[in-house]
Amino acid sequence: MKIIIIGATGTIGKHVTAALAQDHEIIKAGSKSGDFNVDISSVESIEAFYKQVGKFDSLVCVSGDGHFGPLGSMKEAHFRVGINSKLMGQVNLVLIGQHYINHKGSFTLTSGSLAEDPIILGTNLSAMNGAINGFVRGAAVELENALRINAVAPDVVEESPIYFPYFPRHIPVTMNSVTQAYLRSVLGGQTGQVYKVSNH
Amino acid sequence: MKIIIIGATGTIGKHVTAALAQDHEIIKAGSKSGDFNVDISSVESIEAFYKQVGKFDSLVCVSGDGHFGPLGSMKEAHFRVGINSKLMGQVNLVLIGQHYINHKGSFTLTSGSLAEDPIILGTNLSAMNGAINGFVRGAAVELENALRINAVAPDVVEESPIYFPYFPRHIPVTMNSVTQAYLRSVLGGQTGQVYKVSNH
């Protein structure tokens, strides 16, 4: 398969890329690195990216920012960070990408455990993750051409120790367990699933 | 208690209003009707509304639009309808309202069954409902002054027959069961809950 990975050089992305590269053609994309640059917060950038890459079989997005900060001083502009990047970026990759992807292709997006297991400072990401989970469930019942769509919802990962203090007593998930969840989506047959990766 | 109901004259709102009005002071608000007009898609309108109303004990929002339409032709602008109204409108009611609400007050927002039980044409609302569920879970762990926040997630309601064709074989929920879910949030002690109202 020809597989696009958005965020291919990131903490999770590099593992997913390495695992899929064994048997597949990988198109690495990122905001500043990879074979192609794409700014997922921009519809124009996404359109240009797909035109360059051409037809493909699978897209994995492990990219997208959210706002991390206290609710007590949160303003709309803070909340819009996650909307414009993690949510709308991934949604636009699908809304536009559905017109470029091959028959029986798949989209695999990234949400996160905060949708259901919140932490202090994480309200924006809880909302964005919940939105992505809802989006994949909704899109799954409408995508044509036997396309599939799933999300992976990881807890804090073992290779991101800078986040450990914000996830008190969370047992970080292994990179292998997270990687396998992405591969289940890409290589499996299910659609509309949220693959939760958590030790809780 | 002094209870604000946004969307007080709507299909659900009028029932919640009638039930709470027996024992409480109700401030009815809506985009075009009620004691006060407020456009929840506008931060300025929400700020002005809270300044007029002053301190209050509970807010119930049963208002907010989403986009209803096919995924295959969906564009970012369609998706932003739900973001700007149902999601950001309710989020802003909380982000701003947390500075006006009394100690031990509560916010009760409206999501919907589509977050987990999708229908054709409902992708935007599935995403928005999931976002609201994530938001209330996230906000619940941070709200100060013993404030509470919950969401009610109704399936299609018996008094909205216009929507029945879009919810094939859903058994519409009674107005009483939906109303009681809002009352559980307002009058109960829980926070961070999503009260699902569905016959499935």
Image (cartoon, coloured by chain):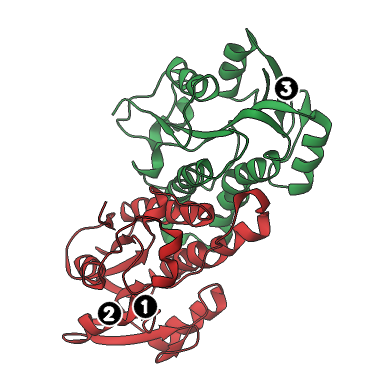
Chain colours: A red, B green
Q: What x and y, as percent, mark residue A40?
A: 50, 74
Disc 1 to disc 2: CB gap under 8 Å: yes
Residue B163 is tagged as none
Separation of residues labelled 3 and 1 (CA atoms): 50 Å
As shown in the figure, which amino acid type bears the numbered disc 3? Ile
Q: Chain of mark 1?
A: A
Q: Which residue is mark 3?
A: B27
> What residue is drawn where x is 50% and y is 78%?
A47
Disc 3 to disc 1: CB gap under 8 Å: no
Q: What secondary structure is found at the residue carrying circle 1?
A: loop
Q: Are marks 3 and 1 on the same chain?
A: no
Q: Up-down: is B156 above or below B116?
A: above
Is residue B6 at least partly visible in the picture?
no
Q: What x and y, as percent, mark residue A91?
A: 46, 63
Q: What secondary structure is found at the residue carrying circle 2?
A: helix
> What residue is drawn where x is 36% and y is 78%?
A11
Q: Residues within 10 Å of mark 3 (few under 14, many from 20)?
A: some
Q: Up-down: is B5 above or below A18?
A: above
Q: What secondary structure is found at the residue carrying circle 3?
A: strand
Q: Report the front residue among B107 and A183.
A: B107
Residue A15 is tagged as 2
Disc 3 to disc 2: CB gap under 8 Å: no
Q: Chain of mark 2?
A: A
Q: Chain of mark 3?
A: B
Separation of residues labelled 3 and 2 (CA atoms): 54 Å
Left or right of A36 in this view: B42: right
Q: Which residue is mark 1?
A: A11
Farthest residue, direction bottom: A35
As shown in the figure, which amino acid type bears the numbered disc 2? His
